[in-house]
Image: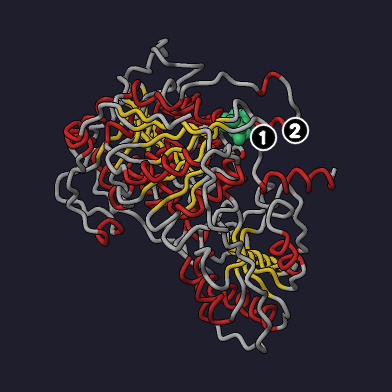
Amino acid sequence: MAVRRRQGSGSKSHREKNGARKETALSATARRRPAKMDGTPPMIGDYLIRRLQDYGIRDVFGIPGDFVLQFYGMLQDSPIRVIGTRREDCAGYAADGYARINGMGAVCVTYCVGGLSVTNSVAGAYAEKSPVIVISGAPGMDERRSDPLLHHRVRDFNTQREVFEKITVASALLDDPLTAFREIDRCLEAADRFKRPVYLELPRDRVRSRALYPHPGPQERPASDKQILKAAVEDAVRMIEGSQQPVIIAGVEIHRFGLREEVVRLAERNQIPMCATLLGKSVVSERHPLYLGVYEGAMGRESVRRYVEESDCVILLGTFMTDINLGVFTAHLDPSKCIYVTSEKLRIHHHHFHDVLLADFVKRLAKADLKAAPRPLPAATSAECEPFVPKADQKITMKRLFQRINETLGENMVVVADVGDALFAASDLTIHQHTEFLAPAYYTSMGFAIPAAIGVQTANAKLRPIVLVGDGAFQMTCMELSTAVAHGFNPVVLVLNNRGYTTERFLQDGPFNDIPNWNYHRLPDLVGGGWGFEIHTEGELDQSLKAALQNKDTFSLLNIHLEPRDISPALERLTRGLAKKL
Ligand SMILES: Cc1ncc(C[n+]2csc(CCOP(=O)(O)OP(=O)(O)O)c2C)c(N)n1
Ligand SMILES: [Mg+2]
């Protein structure tokens, strides 16, 4: 079957009207500096907007409603751009994707119907350490006095806030101008420090309430205990110096805390090989000569697994020991041979250290003069991809598809993988120096990838998302391609159409894993923009990918027909590893 291409009518003028970024007066350095107050006492809403900008937030995702319209009006008059999404949970994923690129992201929604819809994506951001600020409108404090049954209310007026308390690192009701300004500072500081979401509830009659007293602005930042930091670094240095086969495993927090250069310096100065976890994939360039690959137990490549598990000093930096990172617990790491540091914990073999910040520890360790005899390095284990020569009429398979994608990856591309075999297969991709890799690799909520790609391009329009998404996940959040059209974004979306929940077929199969087949490539007709391609063969894949990459003006969608039981080599390794274990 020939490639069918469809082009919707999304126009540039539409994009220019809606997508043009409002100029922000803040320079990059000013963004990190706290907002200065002039003589007039600020309003709560204004102060919040200024503080968001201090943390580099230039865009907010969401859908308005009557309880948050006043604040939306204020946002409209500010340098911050509002990106409307089709659903609130998608706004949450978009803000999460934005935060992963930009450092922090924000959603702004209405009370309960919007807020409660965003909980799943915020829970994912919490689990995977992505700092998303949730701003929700709420009934005015004066309206609440006689406990009326106002629309959107669930049980009582605190219900939504109590839900968010469980899935954020800090939360506040901005009901009192005496405390609201401090509360905004406290919550934003917590989001920045712990790289987790926070929740701010803004009653509609408090948006314009002014400070009663001059607000001094944000207070001092937390610091490491110097003595404990010194002792911990000395302990780590001794352990590394005495080891024969040290190895670094870099995790997602290295990216979140901007410590990539320090980790690479530590590796290069001491010739220590590096791996990443799946959640931290691409945290160091996968083309670096010291890079071995993703360590993920039986799911990863055997040579990487063996090197790490035979190591007498595993330096885990900003790594979370999740089941997916550990290949669904098929990994074997002995704590007595590990240096384990995250923003929450520092353990060196069996010693625990407190009051040491991750960044301070990593920076000090990278600067330390380690004396160790030169050790042999492992042979290059990074799987170089075989060149892809398309066999024009051959039916496309997962293995061949990902070989072709691997060739496509270049500078300024971001691979955004959804849950399913898209994620497992993507673990084998070689991410280049300037390519990022984003995936919900721990919380694994389907539907992340398309809205997260919107967040990525909102944060940096020069980044080109390559979205890998199963048909099941696509059916959950594909409506956000309409948002891509509205803003002139150009992700390349590869729909792995295996007509169902293939990953689950290998756990337990049944008709519940079948899903309706859609003409995915015809979505451009519906949303009024984008190019669609239908693909059965390697030749069609090759042609379509080339055309999609050349199409810079709008999104491209490739409907790739796969067999329901065709899986990637990574998922094959995992199912084999699990079969041995069970
Ligand atoms: C929101 C959500 N619902 C359900 C699941 C459970 N689940 C995990 S993988 C999967 C199937 C994914 O199907 P698809 O997107 O088509 O990818 P495939 O497995 O076919 O590669 C399901 C239902 C989930 N992870 N997230
Ligand atoms: Mg599927």
Disc 2 C-beta below 8 A from ligand 1: no
Q: Please tell me whether residue 464 is drawn above or below residue 496 in the rendered image.
A: below
Q: Which mark is residue 242?
A: none
Instruction: Give the quarter of the image for residue 275.
Output: bottom right
Per the image, label 2 sits on a secondary structure element best described as loop
Q: Position of residue 430 (x, y in %)?
A: 53, 58
| Residue at the left extreme, as displayed | 39
Q: Residues within 10 Å of mark 2 (few under 14, many from 20)?
A: few
Q: Residue furthest top?
A: 149
| Residue 544 x/y as whole percent | 41, 40
On the rendered image, what quadrant is the C terminus found in? top right
Q: Is residue 175 visible?
A: no
Say whether mark 1 is within 8 Å of ligand 1. Answer: yes
Front one among 301 and 67 = 301
Q: Is 575 placed above or below 367 here?
A: above
At which x and y percent is residue 169? 51, 44
Residue drawn at (61%, 46%), measured in percent from left and top?
A: 399
| Residue 139 as seen in the image, left or right of residue 248 | left
Q: Residue at x 66, y 36 (%)?
A: 566
**Quarter of the image where one finds residue 68:** top left
Residue visible at 40% across and 11% down? 148
Q: Please determine whether, in this image, residue 462 is positioned above or below residue 474.
A: below
Q: Which residue is mark 2?
A: 507
Could you tell me the amino acid type at mark 1? Thr
Identify the mark at residue 503; answer none if there is no mark.
1
Q: Give the percent coordinates (x, y) of residue 429.
A: 55, 53
The amino acid sitting under disc 2 is Leu
Q: Secondary structure at mark 1?
A: helix
Q: Is disc 1 in contact with disc 2, using a CB cutoff of under 8 Å?
A: yes
Horizontally, residue 12 falls left or right of residue 509, namely left
